[in-house]
Structures are given as C-alpha cells and as structure tokens.
Image (cartoon, rainbow, N blue to C red):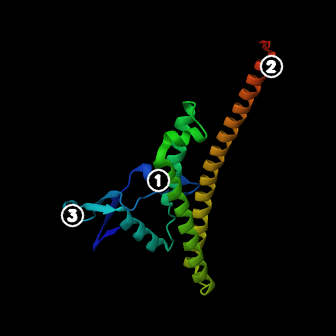
Amino acid sequence: MEAGHRKGTVKIESTFIDKVGENFELHLNNFSKFKFLDERNQNYSSILLGKEIIGQLSKENERIPTRKNYGMNYVHDLFEATNLLSRHGISGQESFKHLGEEFITNMEKVELALEQLDKEMLTQTERVKFNQENPQLIEQLKQLQNEHKSLESAYKELTDELEIYDQIENLQAQKQEKRTSQEQEKQPHVRR
C-alpha cells in the first residue's frame, strides 16, 4: 500500500474482513481510520482513511467497490425500533404513536433513498446504452441494481411486518368484539 510516495503496510482489524470461499472481502467505511506503517522508517507512519484504501485497492484490482446504501441504516433502525416495541406488546398503529416523528421521518428517508437509486440507475443505464463495451460502467449498473434490490426488499419486509401487526391487531379486536357481544347475549335481559 502507498501513502503519498511512501510504501508500507496498512493495519486492518479482522472485524473489517470476511472470508468468502477462497477470497476475502473488506468492509470499510470512507471515514474509518487505519494505521499505515512505513516500510523504511517507522517514524513516518501515519493514519489513512478508509476512502484512500478503497481507492487504491479498486485501482490496483480494477474493480469497483460495492457500496452499502445509507438508506439501509434507516431500515435496520426501523426494524430494531419495531422489534423493541413488539417485545413489550406494542405493535401496529399503536407503535407509530410510540415511535413518533423520527420513525416516520426515517421511513421517508428510506423512500427517498430508493427514489435516488432509481434516478442513478436510469442515468447509469443511459451511460451503458451508449458505451456497452465498458465493463466498469456495466459493473456500476449491476451494483446499483443490487443495492436497490436489497434496500427495497428490506424496506418491503419492514412494511409487510407492520401490516401483519395491524392485521393481527384487527383480528384480536374483532374477536374481542365478538366475545363481548356473546357475553351480552347470554346475560338475562331485565324488564322495566
């Protein structure tokens, strides 16, 4: 790895590395910091940002890095919030009251992220259409499509879960109404 004109080694913790078959995958954040150890002189060691490492590795391997859409963070937060409330017996429409504005804002942010990905895919499709021999453009389009697909499926799973909560809640309310009406029918009527 290089830092400016110096060569050396980058120290990356194992938590950033996954072994997939015979290959390794790095999961780096643009703003993560990593220690760069200078080959010749340890006094010139420094800190490299994740985006610098990502840039060098993608240039050396001639591969485009796969990125995680920021909207996925909101989906995970939404799942955690709904799961927390459901563990405490709060679900469906009632959960929206407890989660408040931030929950709805996060759902809107996910929807905006999906819209943004749609626009990016459209733009990238136009680029590929006029330059079909460029494998990098095709790879970028595939990555955008995968990113959109994973975000959309996670968001759909969340909204489906919320709908299931609502259906269960409605079913329970209907059963309760039925029990109440049956109990009222069983009670003797008093004449005046």
Residue beneath the point at 58% across and 70% down:
118
Q: Amino acid at mark 2?
A: Glu
The part of the image, by quadrant, that contains residue 10 is bottom left
Q: Quadrant of the N terminus?
A: bottom left
Q: Position of residue 104 (x, y in %)?
A: 51, 51
Q: How would you rate the neighbour count of disc 2 (Cα within 10 Å): few for under 14, some for 14-19, many for 20 or more?
A: few
Q: Residue tagged by mark 3? A: 44
Q: Is residue 13 left or right of residue 110?
A: left
Q: Nearer the viewer, residue 148 or 29?
A: 148
- Vertical order, 37 against 139 (above or below): above
Q: Amino acid at mark 1?
A: Ile
Say which amino acid is labelled 3: Tyr
Front: mark 2 or 3? 2
Q: Nearer the N terminus, badge 2 or badge 1?
A: 1
Quarter of the image where one finds residue 164: top right
Q: Quadrant of residue 173?
A: top right
Q: Which residue is mark 2?
A: 185
Q: Are marks 2 and 3 in contact (CB under 8 Å)?
A: no
